């Protein structure tokens, strides 16, 4: 990565991602809590409905029990009134008969007196009978018990269910608020992440465009280099490493010291150092012609790789540079050093 801003942008992006994921976790947890309380609220509401129905049923059945009770009381009252009226009449008849009997006794009309007396006793018996009936009916009326009221207990159950539901509903409302806040926070975190990602992607695209492929001049392998590098290398890392190892092999061998004379194919030859931009560590040897005087004149030229100890370039004095032999003969087959 060539652009130092990329590291910062990547860090900002990672933080924004982390923030977004944390916000998502909080939002999901708040949603679970909201759903839990929603279900709890639904089931407490169902309990309110059930309690309300039971309360209404109790109210209705209480009403019909009271109606029945009232009708029963009214019926017995009518029967009491009826029996009292007969008893009153019997009392009046009895009084009248005994009065007439008393008058007949005073008139010494014994036959009439006896008749009225017996008539009076019949009325008395009737009176006693109907008084007994009145007493019996009153005791029945007194035994009529008012219907007991289950309505109030159902009503208090309903009220406590309703209160419980209101509490759950309030809890739900709070959970809903918490969730909605968490959702907004997540959306904000997501926006922040999107912004950071767009900035990163844009910078990355620009950074990617800075890279291009270049062939290693030595081995031909493709290398990734950047347009903003001041001096992109012409050689790959492996080749640089080979150059270094080759230079070390050459420099550590006293035979290859510059100016040394050696024998090549029975002729005196001279180790030289070529003036090159990149010292790849090869050993150059000039032979034949002007070679021993110094470069510039007519001469043959071989190049040795001190790592593999092979001849990698070989040009006779009369060959042009284009005709040079390049082979892999062992150096020792040609040289006496
Ligand atoms: Zn290379």
Image: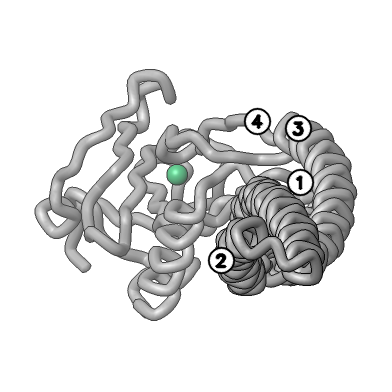
Spatial CA distance of label 1 from label 3 is 23 Å
What residue appears at the point 50 percent right and 57 percent down from the top-left corner?
A: 240
Circles 1 and 3 in contact, beta carbons < 8 Å: no
Q: Earlier in the sequence, mark 4 or mark 3?
A: 3
Crowd around label 2: few <14 · some 14–19 · many ≥20 (10 Å): some
Q: Give the mark toward the camera: 4 or 2.
A: 2
Spatial CA distance of label 4 from label 2 is 138 Å
SS of the residue under disc 2: helix
Quadrant in the picture for the C terminus: bottom left
Q: Earlier in the sequence, mark 4 or mark 2?
A: 2
Q: Which mark is residue 212?
A: 4
Spatial CA distance of label 4 from label 1 is 14 Å
Residue 13, given in percent of the width and then of the height, sits at: 78, 54
Residue 256, given in percent of the width and then of the height, sits at: 38, 69
Circles 4 and 2 in contact, beta carbons < 8 Å: no
Q: Is residue 251 left or right of residue 202?
A: left
Spatial CA distance of label 4 from label 3 is 13 Å
What residue appears at the point 65 percent right and 30 percent down from the top-left corner?
A: 212
Q: Which mark is residue 205?
A: 3
């Amino acid at each position: 990565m060539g652009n130092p801003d990329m590291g910062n942008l990547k860090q900002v992006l990672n933080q924004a991602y982390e923030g977004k994921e944390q916000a998502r976790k909080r939002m999901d947890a708040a949603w679970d809590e909201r759903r839990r309380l929603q279900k709890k609220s639904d089931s407490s509401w169902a309990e309110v409905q059930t309690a309300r129905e039971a309360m209404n049923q109790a109210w209705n059945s209480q009403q019909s029990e009271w109606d029945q009770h009232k009708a029963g009381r009214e019926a017995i009252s009518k029967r009491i009134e009826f029996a009292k009226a007969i008893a009153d009449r019997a009392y009046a008849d009895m009084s009248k008969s005994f009065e007439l009997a008393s008058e007949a006794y005073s008139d010494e009309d014994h036959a009439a007196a006896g008749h009225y007396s017996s008539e009076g006793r019949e009325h008395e018996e009737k009176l006693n009978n109907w008084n007994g009936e009145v007493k019996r009916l009153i005791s029945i009326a007194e035994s009529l018990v008012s219907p007991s009221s289950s309505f109030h207990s159902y009503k208090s159950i309903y009220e406590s269910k309703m209160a419980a539901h209101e509490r759950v509903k309030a809890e739900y409302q709070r959970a809903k608020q918490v969730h909605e806040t968490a959702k907004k926070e997540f959306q904000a975190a997501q926006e922040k992440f999107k912004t950071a990602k767009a900035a990163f992607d844009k910078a990355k695209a620009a950074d990617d465009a800075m890279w291009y492929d270049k062939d290693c001049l030595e081995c031909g392998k493709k290398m990734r280099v950047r347009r903003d590098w001041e001096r992109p290398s012409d050689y790959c890392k492996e080749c640089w490493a080979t150059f270094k190892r080759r230079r070390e092999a050459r420099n550590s061998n006293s035979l290859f010291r510059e100016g040394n004379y050696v024998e090549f194919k029975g002729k005196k030859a001279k180790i030289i150092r070529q003036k090159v931009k990149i010292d790849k560590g090869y050993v150059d040897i000039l032979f034949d012609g002007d070679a021993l005087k110094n470069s510039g004149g007519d001469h043959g030229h071989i190049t040795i790789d001190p790592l593999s100890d092979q001849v990698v370039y070989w040009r006779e004095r009369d060959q042009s540079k284009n005709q040079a032999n390049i082979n892999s003969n062992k150096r020792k087959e040609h040289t006496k050093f």
